[in-house]
């Protein structure tokens, strides 16, 4: 019987749900922080950013995994939604980090979400965990987000999950599938920009690897083989037996979803490599974007 207890915040999302299922499948006890009324003895109600978290909640907890944050895939990023993106990350992270510091000696490891958006738009560069934050809205948000988590580093091990977009029908592929289904798939901007990516399977496996190997600091959760936006889009179109022809110029994307979202998500070029994961012996199940998309999709035709 596994005697680990993992406390998870943000467990209702795509990554959190898959991670909880994986951990519970191996007999690991899960406690969840939830913002609604509790429904089971394994849930703890909290109000992050508003009410402190009792450090006693961390008693007998092996590790905290913080996956809180509103979806960056919801578009457009209005001024109001950008405030939501920030508050939904900074508030919970600060609340958890404060509880860890107050717990003091023997506090559980703190594994906190971030994103490869940290690097911003860096064409022509190979980006490792040693590189500095970029200048885009998303990069600056990630930098602040990570800074809050790192305030707990004097009390415990802190690991930052710089996660790439998930190649999954409920992840980054969701809007692409809709456009492709109607024959509207095609290059976004020039389409040559490098898009970091990871499969949901390897995202969960990587988080579990981090739990087991004690990696700390920033860790890039991104597939090991670089892929352009065109390669990802055309692979999806091929699997769906649809054309990949209709271009969306950069100016049209900026007009349609806003400059911050267009430049931070669709047009950003960031060749992010998983140096720490590979150096610690992690082996990807899906090494290429073709493998990841094929595993995630049921071919249409």
Image (spheres, grey):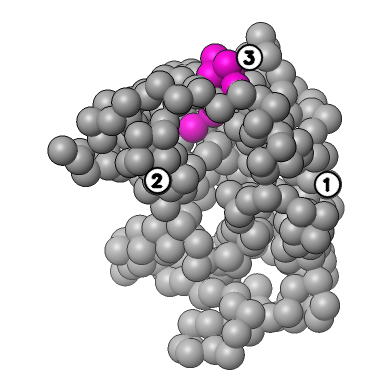
Determine the residue positioned at 35% across, 58% down.
Answer: 22
Whether residue 179 can be seen here:
yes
Q: Nearer the viewer, residue 278 or 11?
A: 11
Q: Which quadrant does the C terminus fall into?
A: top left
Task: Give the CA distance from mark 3 to mark 2.
Answer: 31 Å
Q: Tell me, for residue 271, which label it has, or none.
A: none
For disc 3, the neighbor class at 10 Å (few under 14, some 14 to 19, many from 20) is: few
SS class of the residue under badge 1?
Answer: helix
First in sequence, mark 3 or 2: give its number.
Answer: 3
Expressed as whole percent of the image width and height from the top left, the position of residue 263 reads: 71, 31
Judge whether residue 190 is colored magenta: yes
Expressed as whole percent of the image width and height from the top left, the position of residue 246 reads: 45, 25
Write down the region rendered in magenta: 189-197
Q: Is residue 292 left or right of residue 122?
A: left
Determine the residue positioned at 45% across, 35% down.
Answer: 198
First in sequence, mark 2 or 1: give its number.
Answer: 1
Residue occupied by mark 1: 144
Whether residue 199 can be seen here:
no
Q: Is residue 148 left or right of residue 261?
A: right
How many marks on residues?
A: 3
Say if 32 sits above or below 276 in the image: below
Contact between marks 2 and 1 (CB within 8 A): the answer is no
Task: Give the CA distance from mark 2 to mark 1.
Answer: 33 Å
Q: Within the image, what quadrant is residue 293 found in? A: top left
SS class of the residue under badge 3?
Answer: strand
First in sequence, mark 1 or 3: give its number.
Answer: 3
Q: Tell me, for residue 126, which label it has, or none.
A: 3
Judge whether residue 261 is colored magenta: no
Q: Within the image, what quadrant is residue 1 found in? A: bottom left
Q: Within the image, what quadrant is residue 56 found in? A: bottom right
């Amino acid at each position: 019987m596994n005697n680990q207890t993992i406390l998870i915040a943000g467990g209702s999302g795509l990554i959190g749900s898959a991670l909880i299922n994986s951990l519970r499948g191996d007999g690991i006890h899960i406690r969840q922080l939830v913002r609604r009324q509790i429904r089971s003895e394994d849930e703890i109600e909290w109000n992050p950013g508003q009410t402190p978290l009792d450090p006693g909640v961390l008693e007998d907890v092996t590790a905290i995994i913080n996956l809180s944050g509103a979806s960056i895939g919801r578009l457009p990023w209005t001024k109001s939604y950008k405030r939501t993106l920030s508050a939904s990350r900074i508030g919970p992270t600060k609340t958890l980090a404060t509880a860890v510091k107050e717990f003091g000696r023997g506090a559980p490891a703190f594994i906190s979400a971030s994103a490869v958006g940290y690097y911003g738009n860096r064409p022509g560069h190979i980006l490792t965990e040693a590189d500095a934050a970029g200048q885009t809205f998303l990069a600056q948000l990630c930098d602040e987000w990570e800074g809050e988590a790192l305030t707990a580093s004097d009390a415990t091990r802190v690991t930052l999950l710089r996660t790439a977009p998930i190649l999954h029908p409920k992840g980054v592929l969701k809007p692409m599938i809709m456009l492709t289904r109607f024959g509207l798939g095609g290059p976004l901007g020039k389409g040559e920009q490098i898009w970091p990516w990871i499969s949901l399977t390897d995202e969960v496996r990587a988080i579990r690897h981090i739990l087991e190997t004690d990696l700390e600091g920033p860790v890039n959760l991104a597939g090991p083989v670089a892929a352009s936006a065109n390669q990802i889009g055309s692979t999806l179109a091929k699997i769906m037996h649809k054309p990949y022809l209709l271009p969306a110029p950069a100016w049209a994307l900026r007009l349609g979803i806003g400059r911050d979202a267009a430049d931070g998500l669709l047009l950003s070029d960031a060749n992010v490599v998983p140096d720490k994961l590979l150096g610690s012996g992690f082996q990807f199940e899906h090494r290429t974007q073709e493998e990841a998309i094929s595993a995630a999709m049921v071919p249409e035709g």
